[in-house]
Amino acid sequence: MSGHQVKQEGAKSRADGGFFSPGQFPHSPGAPLGIMSSRGGCSPSQGSSPSIILEHKSPAGSGEPQTGDQERVGEGFGQDCSHLPPWASLRGCWEKKTQDVPGSPLEPSLHWFSFQQDEILLTPWRDFPVEDTDPFTPPSEEKWDFVLVSDIHEVGSEKETKRKKFLDELSKKGFTIKKIEDMKLFYGVRAPEQVFRKYECLLGNPDKKLQNENSPQDIPMTTRIRIVNLILRHTVTPDLEKLQDLMKKNVFEAMFPLHEKEAVREFSKDNWARWRGVFNEQPIEKIRCYFGEKVALYFAWLGWYTCLLGVAALAGVLTFVAGIALFSSSQVSREICEANTTIMCPLCDKKCPYWVLSDTCTYAKVTHMIDNEATVLFAIFMALWATVFLELWKRQRATVVTNWDLYGWDEEEEELAMGLINNLQYEPRKYQHSYFRSTIVLLLVLLMILVLIGIAHALVIYRVIATALFAQSSLGLLREQADTMAVITGAMLHYLTIVIMTKINRRVALFLCDLEKPRSFSQREKTFTMKIFTFQFFTNFSSLIYIAFFLGRINGRPGHYVRIAGRWRLEECHPSGCITDLFIQMAIIMLLKQTISNVMEYLIPWISHKLRKTHKRPKKRSIFLGEEEEAEDPCKRQWLRNYELNEVNVFSLFDEFLEMMIQYSFTTIFVAAFPLAPLLAFLNNIFEIHLDAIKMVRLHRRMVPRRANDIGIWLQVLEAIGILAVIGNGLVIAITSDFIPMQVYKYMYSPCVGENRTDVDCSTGYINHSLSVFRIRDFEPDMGVPEMLPNFDRDEIKECRYRDYRNADDYTYTMQFWHVLAARLAFLIIFEHVALCVKLIAAWYIPDVPQKVKNELLCRKHTDLRKELSMMEYSTEV
């Protein structure tokens, strides 16, 4: 047993049920208590005493001076057991039997069962007669609940004192603690079994489906970790400090549960945590048993979402292909390509020439490829798809949690039970609401939203200035594509603002949550989720909202432009519409988010893990001739490997959910302008599932499992996004798209009006009818004289055209403008009402809970009531 020592943390009296002072044993006065341990074992016996700390000192460690009564363990007690009192029990080396003792129903008698060269541990009688584990279980199969990591502090320092006080509090609660010294101090902690028996007693054994049939008394590891995590975080030292306070003061560096090698191997066999298993089915039940229900529900939801995204992606591809088929056949595109005599007004004030409409032939074809009749049908389809997806997920979720026996799980009841397990004097925090505090938080949220809108305005200013500078460039290509280049660079700048503001939004949301003082962790998570999603929504979509609904509509007209700082005029839309600008912006942001962000999401943890392995792992000590190498404790190797992994926190899973919610918003809200959004999301999610799995299993420390029976507040977020999708797509078609103006022209101003002509396309003349005439003598005096077009005489150009519906004499709006405006509003109202009605009908038509689940729950209630009635009748008869 070389390398192992034992430290008694303070002898307890017999009345306290603790250990006995050394002098109380007649065979060995003054001898320390022993431990049971096997060579090479990963853990001490699970039945070991809670007030014993096992220590393993690394030969290469720096060596912290030891304090207190510490001695090397002897070779065991004598074979004569007659001196042992009846209330003593020997863990691991004794066989326990029961006999009737007056005044006690089951009092154990002890019989000697010796193992050669093993030490033994003398422990007191416990209130719970159930053994922690089978005494003959090999130590290598035993597990520790948590590991605490600390720096090696100086003897007598404040940090060392605080650390010992905290560990003493754990010892008083019955925890077994093992200490390993390396470059850091590692403390493995294991809770006593009575803690988990209390949990089962209070909540009626909620984990019976997870328990091993061969040993039903075993507690699932996910439950153990969850309970121990709560106890560790709520243990208070005599200085009124909790573990979180000690970690802020660097008394402890980290705390984490351990990964299980067998479970990791199973995930590898299933190819869930490997890239080659991209198209394999997810082992949801194994995920639940290892990471808990919260993580399992995330992967179940993500898999379901990805599966149904395949349908939306197919519809989007068909819509896009239909647009490609019409690439050159559109009458509007042909008119633009043939308009080589239509002179357009300059795009900037100085050094910008007049230009011919036919120069933008390709741009017009691309616009019609996106903006056509199929887009309207696709927008309606996506509104219906979002509803069907949510309703089908609710059914899937009900089926899954029913199989887990969690359909009627009460989170509040579990919170109260775990609080009482940790402390019998626990009093829950009451629900509180302060209108004053809520008003302050609301005002600060509105202020933050205004800041985010201001950032969107800054992006608008950048696009305006960039357009002016590009238009004056000496490079011909840059000058000709000034608008497009401004859109592309603006989208890249928008992506950078998203990356930066995501970090700021998190800090602001946390600060606002602290102001609200939520009652519990789950309530804090809900309020934080709503705030961070609101901030992220405005961060991601403010610029898109401007492009979709304001670009080219608030810029004024030639001779009376709206200017920023009285100098730079706002952007204009292309004569064929602004929807291509929205398409480019969404395409760039989605591609950057799904490539750069995902690559960094994998590379940063991978590189960090490699660096930690390189820096944290000490060099092996050289062995001199004749020196016997000391066997390394397997726990040390396991704990170091887990310590080298990347840290996880309460936001680890939250960040994955938030990422998917923003993606879902891009996929649904402005999908009418970007039909390929579902396809990009589908391809991303296929890899996202396994990227998240690899991070959780191989690159990050094990998450603390959390119990849940749904995805929580995210379901309400999805429903809100579904409503926003109906409104957003209706506005895109009504305002951004040229679909409505073209329909108004066809039925009120085209050659087809009043007669049924089949030899003419009804959209003939639309471009000429949608461009207004401006007299160049009416330009502002300080605008300067624009450069003339080649092959045109300066004196010949008297007028130029611009996109609007205005009279040529006084530049007031024409009657067609009011017709188009009325048609836009009418379509918006009709579209949104029809889409919302379809959503409501679909939600009613598809029940949230399958009939099979309802019947199963009904049968369970009926069976339970019959059992209770039978028990009552039996007790009455007796």
Image: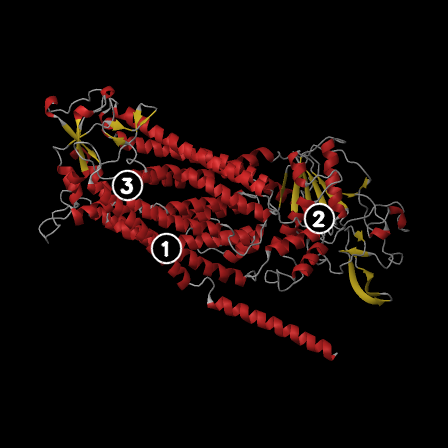
Reading the image, the residue beneath label 2 is 39
Where disc 2 sits, the SS reads: loop
Residue 648 seen in the current view: no
For marks 2 and 3, give the one nearer the viewer: 3
Taking depth in this image into account, of 739 and 433 the one nearest to the observer is: 433
For marks 1 and 2 on the same chain, the one whose residue lies earlier in the sequence: 2
Percent position of residue 7, x then y: 78, 42
Reading the image, the residue beneath label 3 is 579
How many numbered badges does the structure rendering display?
A: 3
Percent position of residue 332, x then y: 17, 43
For marks 1 and 3 on the same chain, the one whose residue lies earlier in the sequence: 3
- Compared across the picture, whether 830 is left or right of 121 comes to left
Q: Amino acid at mark 1?
A: Leu
Disc 1 crowd, CA 10 A, few/some/many (<14, 14-19, 20+) = some
Where disc 3 sits, the SS reads: helix
Percent position of residue 98, x then y: 80, 65
Where disc 1 sits, the SS reads: helix
Q: Are marks 1 and 2 in contact (CB under 8 Å)?
A: no
What whole-number distance in Å separates the C-alpha atoms at marks 1 and 3?
24 Å
Residue 836 badge: 1
For marks 2 and 3 on the same chain, the one whose residue lies earlier in the sequence: 2
Q: Amino acid at mark 3?
A: Ile
Q: Are marks 1 and 3 in contact (CB under 8 Å)?
A: no
Q: Amino acid at mark 2?
A: Arg
Which residue appears at 65% of the width and 49% of the height?
Answer: 430
Percent position of residue 700, x then y: 54, 43
Residue 431 seen in the current view: yes
**Vertical arrangement, residue 165 with respect to residue 85, above or below:** above
What whole-number distance in Å separates the C-alpha atoms at marks 2 and 3?
72 Å
